[in-house]
């Protein structure tokens, strides 16, 4: 998609999406993106524009990875019609790039002119932190159980010795 329009709220985005002048092939609506992120719609609408075909092909897809080969005739955006959700990261030609929420609920990245390899990777938020906490808790429990068993064993031995040494 060639251009973006910045929206302040979901209500503004919904109104624009329902507007008869909205052309999803020419613009996307960006939420919480830097105002300087462009090209913006006003620049495109202001003059004559030669539209050439862009190309994007998904080459690999599973639950945690998505690889796209994209070719852009001009600077613009790659709009992925997949839910915007925390935990997704994007790489453009092997370098991390920000993912923006677009058109209320989908993902977009800025895509410069040229041929590019785009990768989306899902890293569950909090998964590794939760795994570390779980391992720490299980380790602490096992250490506590081991210590309790050791202390109990020593107390039983001490009692059995004291009982056998009585006259």
Image: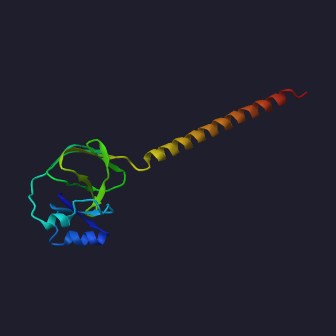
Q: Residue at x 74, y 32 (%)?
A: 154
Quadrant location of the C terminus in the rendered image: top right
Number of marks in the image?
0
Quadrant location of the N terminus in the rendered image: bottom left
Q: Quadrant of residue 8?
A: bottom left
Residue 48 versus residue 144: which sits nearer the camera?
48
Q: Is residue 64 visible?
A: no
Q: Residue at x 34, y 55 (%)?
A: 85
Q: Quadrant of residue 34?
A: bottom left
Q: In this view, does 55 lie above or below 135?
A: below
Left/right of residue 84 with respect to residue 132 in the rendered view: left
Q: Is residue 48 visible?
A: yes
Left/right of residue 62 with respect to residue 44 in the rendered view: right
Left/right of residue 103 with respect to residue 139 in the rendered view: left
At which x and y percent is residue 115? 17, 44
At which x and y percent is residue 80? 23, 54
Residue 156 versus residue 134: which sits nearer the camera?
134
Left/right of residue 52 with respect to residue 102 in the rendered view: left
Q: In which quarter of the image is residue 84?
A: bottom left
Residue 104 versus residue 141: which sits nearer the camera?
104
At which x and y percent is residue 57? 17, 46
Q: Which residue is drawn at 19% across and 67% down?
A: 42
Render colour scheme: rainbow
At which x and y percent is residue 91? 29, 45
């Amino acid at each position: 998609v060639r251009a973006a329009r910045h929206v302040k709220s979901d209500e503004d985005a919904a109104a624009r999406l329902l507007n008869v002048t909205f052309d999803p092939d020419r613009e996307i609506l960006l939420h919480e993106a830097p105002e300087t992120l462009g090209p913006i719609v006003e620049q495109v609408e202001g003059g004559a524009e030669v539209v050439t075909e862009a190309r994007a092909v998904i080459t690999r897809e599973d639950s945690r990875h998505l690889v796209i080969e994209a070719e852009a005739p001009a600077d613009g955006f790659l709009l992925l019609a997949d839910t915007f959700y925390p935990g997704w990261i994007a790489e453009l030609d092997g370098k991390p790039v920000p993912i923006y929420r677009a058109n209320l609920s989908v993902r977009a990245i800025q895509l410069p002119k040229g041929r590019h390899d785009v990768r989306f990777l899902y890293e569950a938020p909090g998964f590794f932190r939760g795994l570390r906490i779980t391992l720490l808790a299980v380790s602490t429990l096992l250490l506590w159980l081991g210590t309790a068993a050791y202390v109990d064993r020593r107390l039983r031995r001490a009692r059995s010795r004291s009982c056998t040494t009585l006259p």
